[in-house]
Amino acid sequence: MRYIFCLILALWPLALSAQNWEDRQIFRGAALHDTAANTDAVQLRILSSTDTAFFIPIIRRFLADRPSVSIEYLVAGSAQIDHIFRQAPAQYDLVISSAMDLQFKLTNDGYAQPIEDLVTPDWAQWRQSLFAFTSEPAAIVIRRADFDGHPIPQTRQELIEAMRARPEVFRNRLGTYDIRRSGLGYLFATQDARASETYWRLTEVMGNLGTRLYCCSGDMITDLANGKLAVAYNVLGSYALARSETASALTVVLAADFPTTMMRTGFVTASAPQPELAKEFIRHLIRVQTQAVDPESFLLPPLIQSQITPAQSTIALGPALMTYLDRLKRRMFLKEWTRAIIR
Amino acid sequence: MAEPGQVQGSLRNRLAVTLIGGAALLALLLFFVVRSYAAQIAQQGQDSILTASVSSILDAAVLRDDQVEIDFPYAAFSMLTTPADDQVFYAIYRDGELLSGYADLPQQADRAAPKQFQTAQYDGKTVRISTAARTLLGADVRTRITVSVAQTQDALSETLNQISTNVASFGFGFFMLAVLLSFWVSSVTIAPLKRLTTSVTRRGPQDLRPLTKPVPSEMLPLVNSLNTLMRRLNQSLSQSEDFIAEAAHRVRTPLATVRSYAETTLQRVDKEENRQALRSMVRAIDESSRAAGQLLDHAMITFRADHLEHEDLDLGDLVQELVQRLTPVAEMKDIDLVLQIDRPVRLIGDAILLQNAIRNLIDNALKYSPSESVIEISVTASPHPQVAVRDQGAGFPSDEIADLAQRFSRGNNARGTIGSGLGLTIAQDVAAAHGGSLTLSNTAGGGACVIFSV
């Protein structure tokens, strides 16, 4: 019995690395490039839902000042992150995710540790432990080619009307998050439903026309670019604008009726192996994201956006975020959503 | 000077300390009462929000096909937002079986009748838990839903700390004000006592009238006993004055008789040694009768000083009259009285007393002057009306001048040199009664100089 236990313990890292990561990269400081074996180097493990490409400049800048540090950047879906992290909270130094509700619940449940001396607006932090570093509205991304000679819808209502007017164009060419798998998709859907009944009408129209469901914004942008989709609803506009080949073909619409804006958040885990370094990383992240240095190389949208007022549309970091994570509420919401979208 | 009394504490300090101590006690009491009251109110505030949250969840519970659905509103948790970002935990049970929420949130043992509020430890933090239950009735089921919502108390303790700080500074301010007030109150309270002390201290040595100024009721017994004491003192003083005057009067008359017999006998006796004895006798009798006269004068002055008569008079006329009267006596001793007067020297005073005083001074000068000498008497008007008497005698013993002056001020004749001492004492008393003074000195030529100024 004991041998089996030891075996499990020995194989546990293997099992972890066998985890089905969307992406997994190790960045090394300048001092570590030559030596192949750097086992005793200080390593920061970041669990994130953000595509690696967005974080490369931030990590590079961080490592430039710390040549003897290496960073392991692990990417998983926002819903998966919650699951992976709760399995082994001591394995990771930082958790970064776009699913505010899940991040909030992790913090509320005591998985985060405070960074006392970090100054950030009150609405962009919770318990001085969970810190927001971007403001990103959920967007309707439209393939411009499919709207030649037609007005581009600016609200959800106009989108409904456009889809009803030309059902043949949109049939099976609509995309949105599969909110059963995506934490961010679930957050957007619940916040939309909370804001207006229009959401349910839109979802029903989309369900009637046939909607493809995606795990991530990146895949939706790809399918929009290659023509599989004409419209994607509740996508992160930043992903569309980040890619030059897609930026020209697509139009990002921020719904004028009620733009839902989320904030990407990160925290240092309570049992982080490298707490001080992890705190420095958060400070570095906030600095880069608030001082708007060199927007060309840093691709993530800044925390404070000029065109949207955060108080009105940004999802507030507060206990209310736990409402739709409740098992009973989630079961009911998913039941209704499934009924509407899957025909 | 009077013997200084024994000091035991200070009324003013005792009053101030009592008031300050009381204020400190009240300030502390205020702090604790307000703090505990604030704590109670803050806790009530948290409790009522928790209750609202619980009931909004409970109200949303419905039984559908024997399955519990709770579509509770977003506000159920958003109302628990606090400035301190308090953590929120909850648990929903159906007949003791967890439906949703935090399984390890402390539950109450008595499920049938849960207490509405409890404070417990959860995840190493103190949380306030509100619990309520509701029975749902289905077609053929009866089920009980229990909802607990818990919240940490960071905002509450922040509020309490702020209130404590405010109340503490408020209490301190109140205390400082009370300290200032108590100093003021104690000095105001002590003021009548000071006024009484001043009015008693300022009195002349002869002034034994009762105190008549109004005083606070607490001081009335003191003033009454003081007045009684002074009345008795006055009585016994005047009794002894009366006694001395009576005695002097009784002695003077027989002495005059004895003197005239002695003089008659002197003319009849031829033997030189007997004549010598008789002359000594006459001189001794003169001494005695002069002393008796001065005692009478003194008694009279003591009486009159208390009931001073104010008449408008000319000091020059008064002194000239005196000098005329005394010239025969001076001539007997071959002494010249030289009078020099600035006219007019008008003043308000008691003529009889002034006459008596100045006569005593000239008497003294005559007594101590050698034969064939001059006594200068000058009356001047400025800066104060004054009379100076200068003789060519031996002068005052220089080491006793200060002593003599002191002795006058005490109105005392301890050394028993009746002749001179009492005369100067009378002059001194009269000067004092008129608000003036008597100055003793020796002239450059060695004689005595007495300046009587009013």
Image (cartoon, coloured by chain):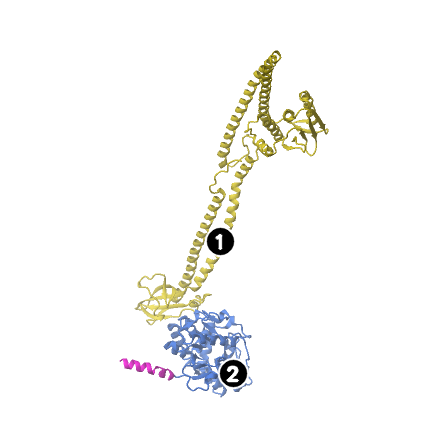
Chain colours: A blue, B yellow
Q: Amino acid at mark 2?
A: Ala
Q: Residue furthest left?
A: A1
Q: Are marks 1 and 2 in contact (CB under 8 Å)?
A: no
Residue sitting nearer the eye, B31 or A295: B31
Residue shown at 32% from the left, 64% from the top: B108
Residue sitting nearer the eye, A227 or B324: B324
Residue sitting nearer the eye, B159 or B93: B159
Query: Which chain is home to disc 1?
Result: B
Q: Secondary structure at mark 2?
A: helix
Relative placement, left or right, of A44 versus A10 is right
Give the x, y percent position of residue B107. 33, 65
Q: If the image is split into quadrants, where does the C terminus of chain A sit?
A: bottom left
Answer whether residue B36 is visible to the viewer in this image.
yes
Residue A15 falls within the magenta-colored stretch: yes
Q: Secondary structure at mark 1?
A: helix
Answer whether residue B317 is visible to the viewer in this image.
no
* Mark 2, other Cα within 10 Å: few <14 / some 14–19 / many ≥20: some
Residue designated by label 2: A242
Q: If the image is split into quadrants, where does the N terminus of chain A sit?
A: bottom left
Residue designated by label 1: B172
Relative placement, left or right, of B316 versus A49 is right
Relative placement, left or right, of B251 versus A74 is right
Question: Bounds of the magenta span?
Answer: A1-18
Residue sitting nearer the eye, A77 or A276: A276
Give the x, y percent position of residue B122. 36, 67
B77 shown above or below A177 = above
Q: Residue furthest right?
A: B343
